[in-house]
Image: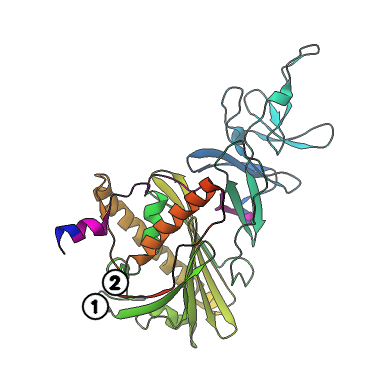
Amino acid sequence: MSEGDAKAATTQAAGFARRFLTDIWYFTALSSDLKRGRLARREILGEPVLLGRSPNGTVVALRDICPHRAAPLSAGSFAREADGRETVECPYHGWRFDADGACAAIPSLVEGQTFDISRVRVRRYRTAESQGMVFIWMAGDARDDREPPAPPPVFPGVVGGAPKLVDRRNFEAHIDHAVVGLMDPAHGPFVHRQWWWRSKASRHEKAKRFEPAAEGFVMVRHPPSSNSRAYALLGGKPMTEISFRLPGLRWEHIEIGRRQVLSLTCLTPVSPTRTRITQIVWSDHPVFALAGPLIRAGARRFLAQDGDMVNLQNQGLKYDPPLMWIDDADRQAKWYQALKREWVASRKEGRAFANPVEAATLRWIS
């Protein structure tokens, strides 16, 4: 490759690993994580967020800073007003806030004092529960309290009752690096070498068809690669479809006759240098009853290997080097960057999102 070609093939990443998408749904918790009457603290896009479920079952999401003395509201508790409203009470001075962020009471005020509590409020985040998951709408403007224009995505294959596997861990990386690592098709023989998956020597040329999909793209349904041994546990003739959708949702939907497996990976940015990854698997396949512990151990090991590689990669990323993207193995990473740029542009220009991905067959060795 000539010097000119190398420069054309590299990206100094203006905007890459330097910003978060807003005006979009992010996965934040499983519905079962939020117990009635309990409050929890999250950090999302570098913002402190109180997340909880009121005693009546309503999901509450507020900025986790009391406007009085900055105490975290999540360290407080739920209270009930005289009119029956459920509020969040600050642990420091007992200021109380409705689920919409409006101040409901300041206990230290005495009769005759004219402080107008209607001027006090904390930011409220819109939430939605779907398929046993809780999503949060991260608006770009903190003052924008409008209903989101569309609900969170719905995934195929959420079957078999409760998830068969849930694994959570933090990757010490910006969400952009986590996303391109997640969709990288060529690292498997090097990072995920184990007897039940594949060996370094088991490498074959692949050709997969991709098409644009809602706010992302999809590797169209196909038989799994013959050198991916884990699929053999499913028996029959599995057919799989792998999808990606902004801001960081990747799922594989496998069909084996009338049985299904859905493996959903949700990336939620905590801060510019940390990303929360949640792996959730649903299935109505009997293999999970027979070999569930083995499958769960393998899946967790798989995710841990990706985390270990992120930590290694950080040794180079701390010098902020230019990154090189090649065809076809890095085309999905290129698509992700194009999708992200278009999302930002469409929001800025107040127009509909226009998916920049074009259908293609990509080829690589893995």
Residue 225 placement: quadrant: bottom left
Q: Residue furthest top?
A: 112
Residue 106 rendering spot, x and y as whole percentages:
72, 22
Magenta span? 5-31
Q: Earlier in the sequence, mark 2 or mark 1?
A: 2
Query: What kind of element bears circle 1?
Result: loop
Q: Quadrant of the N terminus?
A: bottom left
In this orientation, which residue lies closer to the viewer: 107 or 333? Answer: 333
Query: What kind of element bears circle 2?
Result: helix
Residue 123 rendering spot, x and y as whole percentages:
62, 35
Task: Determine whether label 2 and label 1 are within 8 Å by CB.
Answer: yes
Q: Which residue is mark 1?
A: 201
Q: Is the residue 284 above or below the residue 331 in the image?
A: below
Kindly tell me whether residue 151 is visible in this rendering: yes
Q: Residue furthest right?
A: 83
Taking 203 as reference, is 277 left or right?
right
Q: Residue furthest bottom?
A: 236
Residue 186 rendering spot, x and y as whole percentages:
31, 69
**How much space separates mark 2 and mark 1, taking CA atoms?**
7 Å
| Label 1 packing within 10 angstroms: few (<14), some (14-19), many (20+) | few
Q: Which residue is mark 2?
A: 189
In this orientation, which residue lies closer to the viewer: 113 or 245? Answer: 245
Of the residues shown, which amino acid type is indicated by label 2? Pro
Of the residues shown, which amino acid type is indicated by label 1? Ala
Q: Is residue 15 magenta?
A: yes
